[in-house]
Amino acid sequence: MIASHPYESETVRAVTGPTIRPGGLALTRRAAEACGLGAGARVLDVGCGTGATADCLRYEFDASVIGMDFSPLLLADARKRHPELYIVRADAMALPFKAAGFNAVFAECVCALLPDATSALKGFSHVLQSRGYIVVTDLYWRTGTEMATIPPNTNLGGCLAGAVDRYTMIRRIEAAGFEIDLWEDHSDMLRQLAAQLVWSGVSLTDWWGIDCTIGCRNDGRRLGYCLTIAHKKEVFNG
């Protein structure tokens, strides 16, 4: 199969490793510990890629994990690497799972790639049990002011076209029925990965439309990377 997206590229994956994102599994473990995941926890890994997160959560946290992705190329790699994992091809915009079936949903470097992140987050909420956790790691625009909002820049490529500022990201998650438990900036991991990609001959400008180590200086935005954990709010009837 031929790669049609940068994250499917063998050159990129040789640099990023099987997680294909900044920070590798460090933030996955951080999030799993923060959520208190343990034996029997039912987890959906949206955008599972080559299966690195699903494998980590299964073997290190004894969770019951379903991995899903839309890329046949990455799924083929995942099944080759981890034949024991339960992995399916599915669209993050239309999850084929019943309501309240999971204790946690991991969406690592996923939301900014989706055509409608707000709707996707509502779908993630639908498949979560009450007080179940959503884990989001993603690119975001650093504005210098927590309440500042800036419009997405659709002229950029890949996940940068869907990146939003911190305030917008948090409001979207809350609007989907979640309450924020943790938000952390990990932009140092993005800078480290960017340097590794450049060193390996990958053009950040060709990939994203800008060099993320420089940013978009004309409107004050700088690219960052963050971890957000939230739980689904309880709904009381009567």
Image (cartoon, helix red, strand yellow):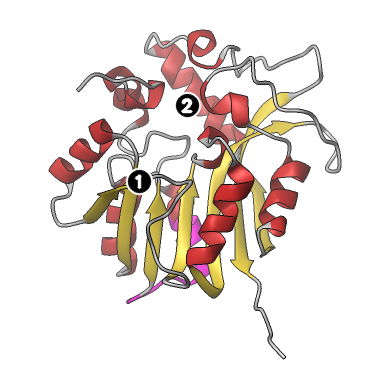
* Residue 221 % position (x, y): 76, 23
In this image, 150 relative to 97: left or right? right
Magenta stretch, residue numbers: 29-40
* Number of on-image labels: 2
Q: Nearer the viewer, residue 130 or 188?
A: 130
- Counting from the top left corner in percent of width and height, residue 204 is at 51, 13
Which residue matches tag 1?
48
Q: Is residue 194 above or below residue 24?
A: above
Tell me where residue 114 appears, x and y as whole percent: 53, 37
Is residue 217 shown left or right of residue 173? right
Question: What is the spatial separation of the Cα atoms under label 2 and label 1, in whole angstroms?
Answer: 19 Å
Which corner quadrant of the image does residue 74 belong to?
top left
Numbered disc 1: secondary structure: loop
Q: Residue at x 80, y 30 (%)?
A: 150
Q: Nearer the viewer, residue 74 or 90?
A: 90
Which residue is rendered at x = 60% and y = 24% of the image? 161
Look at the image and tell me whether residue 34 can be seen: no
Q: Is residue 100 above or below residue 51?
A: below
Q: Which residue is mark 2?
A: 193
Q: Residue sitting at 35 percent across and 21 percent down?
A: 12
Q: In the image, is residue 32 part of the stretch drawn in magenta? A: yes
How would you rate the neighbour count of disc 2 (Cα within 10 Å): few for under 14, some for 14-19, many for 20 or more? Answer: some
Q: Residues within 10 Å of mark 1 (few under 14, many from 20)?
A: many
Can residue 8 be seen from the camera position used here? yes
